[in-house]
Image: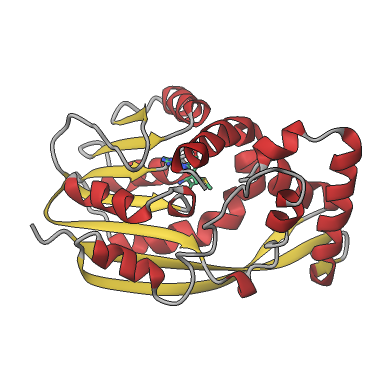
Amino acid sequence: MDPRLQRRVQRYGWDKAVGEYEAGWRAQLEPAQSLMLDMVALQPGEHVLDTACGTGLVSFRIVDAVGENGVVVGTDISGEMVETARRLAAERSIDNASFERLDAEDLSLDCDPFDAAVCGLGLMYVPNPVKAVEEMRRLLKPGGRAAAAVWGARAKCGWAEIFPITDARVTSEVCPMFFHLGTGDMLSHCFAEAGCTDIRSERLEMNLVYASDDDALGAAFRGGPVALAYKRFDDATKRAVHTEYLRSIADYRVGEGYEIPGEFVVAVGINPL
Ligand SMILES: C[S@@+](CC[C@H](N)C(=O)[O-])C[C@H]1O[C@@H](n2cnc3c(N)ncnc32)[C@H](O)[C@@H]1O
């Protein structure tokens, strides 16, 4: 896919998803975000970058980890995500976190170097993830840590059919690289290519729990990566994709809801320069 088109699809897609994102994904992504934060081992007072920060689910946990003497800068390509994170920071009277609308491949920030930079579940959407990790690394102090969490192998992702089901009804693939970094050692290779050293990575398997058909559909279609395409479907197409998707996750039915398997990969590396 043309990188400019991919960025536009992401930017305006996540603008549409913002209202349902946390309801659909907060609990489901928490274990991967926790592993990433454990691996990056933040200390009180540190300055931390959170790229592709979304509504700030990770950024606000970083605020807790670094304390009042720390600083958090969140960046995201979606203006609605950035506005939501800013609003949440204001509502919570947090004054050491700021948020900017920036492409992960072009982090033109004018600030002191960071102690650590993280990217939670964002690199799969970036046209050139090596460039995005290079940008994280460029903004780190020598010895600073970079960490990222991505979805793991396609075969271990029970909701993977969302993509072909949606792609069959649009002209270009919605997330062409979604499982790329989760395959084999690709995430570690990405960090190495971006110039990081001392790279460690871990895999994490878990179930994504949804209480009902509507919760599962909401996360998949309205609050996630295919939201832009979905919003443009007419009612008949929406009904058809719902039926196909629920059929694709039927094996994971538990009572009225679902326990859908998922896998994540988390990597951390050091900026040697
Ligand atoms: C699944 S959300 C993750 C948000 C947050 N990091 C979290 O863990 O909850 C993916 C985010 O990546 C952002 N994104 C996608 N492509 C991007 C790009 N090229 N540059 C910056 N952010 C991007 C989206 O706007 C969205 O907010």
> Closer to the camera, 123 or 5?
5
Q: Position of residue 70 (x, y in %)?
A: 22, 40
In the rendered image, the vertical position of residue 210 relative to residue 84, given as above or below: below
Q: For this view, does 134 lie left or right of residue 129?
A: left
- Give x and y (percent) for residue 32: 48, 61
- Is the residue 215 above or below the residue 244 in the image? above
Q: Measuring from the top left, give residue 175's x and y in whole percent.
A: 57, 51
Residue at (40, 46) in percent of width and height: 61
Q: Quadrant of the C terminus?
A: bottom left
As drawn, 251 above or below 10? below
Residue 136 drawn at (x, y percent): 26, 48
Rendering colour mode: secondary structure
Q: Is residue 206 above or below residue 112?
A: below
Residue farthest along the bottom direction in this orientation:
184
Name which residue lies at 42% across and 22% down. Answer: 90
Name the residue rendered at 20%, 46% in the picture: 46
Q: Quadrant of residue 265?
A: bottom left
* 230 to the left or right of 192: right
Q: What residue is drawn where x is 37% and y is 54%?
A: 129
Q: Please tell me in which quadrant of the rendered image residue 209 appears.
A: bottom right
Query: Total label count?
Result: 0
